[in-house]
Image: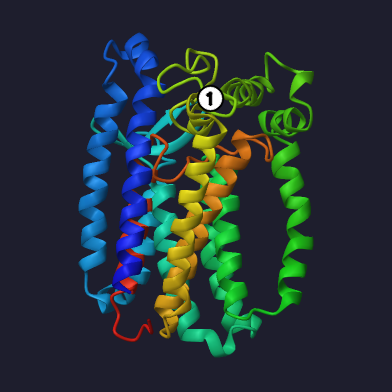
Amino acid sequence: MRKTRLSIILILLMLLGIGVVMIYSSSSIYAWNDKGDSLYYLKRHLFFLLLGFILMFISMAVDQQVIKKLAKPLFLFSLLLLFLSLIPGFSREAAGAKRWIKIGNLGFQPSELIKVTFIIYLADFISRRKDIINNFSYGLLPSLIALSIPILLILLQPDLGTAIALVFVAGIMWFCAGVNYSYFISAGLISLPALYFLVFSIPYRRARIFSFLNPWADPKGAGFQIIQSQIAFGSGGLFGQGLGQGKQKLFYLPAAHTDFIFSVIGEEMGIIGAIVVILLFILLIWQMIKIVRFSNDDFFRFLSIGIVSLIALQTVINIGVSIGMFPTKGLPLPFISYGGSALIFNMVAIGLLLNVSRRKNIFL
């Protein structure tokens, strides 16, 4: 697995390098206007990147049995932090959402931590109860309850995009564990009314759906962001306008250095640059899948499945939103978008996967 590990690290470094360059390009003018320092977001990103590397190497080196033993305590601890993010005095509110815990001048997002700790917890649960996973009362129900708690807390923030991503990751892990198709069909039918209510009972979510279907119906309101994103891609053409030469980041495209950084890549590096980024993600995911395929330990195989699913799903959703394939979700592009908590815990997830590849009972 040494070649696979080296390939993952090399591709990761390339994506992180692209992220550093594009964050500076997309945020410098906004940072100068808002903070009086064009390097403000770049310096913070480099700090998060350093912390991410430290935690990635720790998660890569920690004893593998310790990971299994800490599955439940880590999950419970992250649930506590998620609960505290909703409590005044602990939480930091931004744009009407309580997703952060205040740590000095920084904000920590527990929902990013829960993605990783829930995957560890569910991998441990499935590995222990794989033989009875289709027994609803003892095999599936306890893990459904464990999933419903963070989902409820995340929805209270509110953050529907993260909740949906976590549900899909859990679903993929259950599917790979051999959960009966009938459970998925039943869960889908039961969840449809709830999803309809969550989307169409909240004005801004309803507006996002309508703007996704026809952004030009409200070009200065709900459709503004996706229209500006499409303008960025359209103006980039095949080879782009040149690094740093994009116009949409000049207060036209909201969240240019976070959720819509792929649009800036498309504008400045063109379709060619965007395809290169997509190919890097495809290569990364393919190398990660190799670790899944050749692991014969249930816990570490399901842990790997969860991590691969998480990275792949976030990538597909972010790129899909940027090009107008999906409604706006607010999920960052892994390893490239600005965002401390997301960057750090995605790197921790990669560290765990590299840890799995070090096991002796992996055939390659």
Q: How is the image coloured?
A: rainbow
Q: In the image, 112: left or right of 355?
A: right
Does 351 sit above or below residue 203?
below
Q: Residue furthest front?
A: 239
Q: For mark 1, does the 10 Å Cα neighbourhood hold few (<14), some (14 to 19), or many (20 or more) residues?
A: many
Nearest to the observer: residue 82 or residue 65: 65
Q: What's the residue at 33%, 76% (across, down)?
A: 68
Q: Is residue 315 visible?
A: yes
Tag count: 1
Assign the C terminus to one quadrant of the image. Answer: bottom left
The quadrant of the image that shows the N terminus is bottom left
Q: Nearer the viewer, residue 265 or 65?
A: 265
Which residue is pictured at 47% across the width and 57% down the height?
A: 283
Q: Is residue 136 above or below residue 88?
A: below
Residue 152 seen in the figure:
no
Q: Is residue 100 left or right of residue 45?
A: right
Q: Position of residue 153 (x, y in %)?
A: 51, 49
Q: Quadrant of residue 14?
A: top left
Q: Amino acid at mark 1?
A: Glu
Q: Position of residue 348 (x, y in %)?
A: 32, 56
Residue at the image position 59 percent from the left and 67 percent from the top: 172
Q: Is residue 341 left or right of residue 228?
A: left
| Between 37 and 15, the one nearer to me in the picture | 15
Q: Which residue does the numbered mark 1 point to in the structure image? A: 267
Which residue reaches farthest bottom? 131
Q: Secondary structure at mark 1?
A: helix
The image position of residue 46, as x and y in percent, is: 25, 35
Vertical order, 243 against 71 (above or below):
above
Kindly identify the residue that appears in the image at 71 percent across and 40 percent down. 199
Q: Residue 148's spot in the image, x, y percent?
A: 57, 60
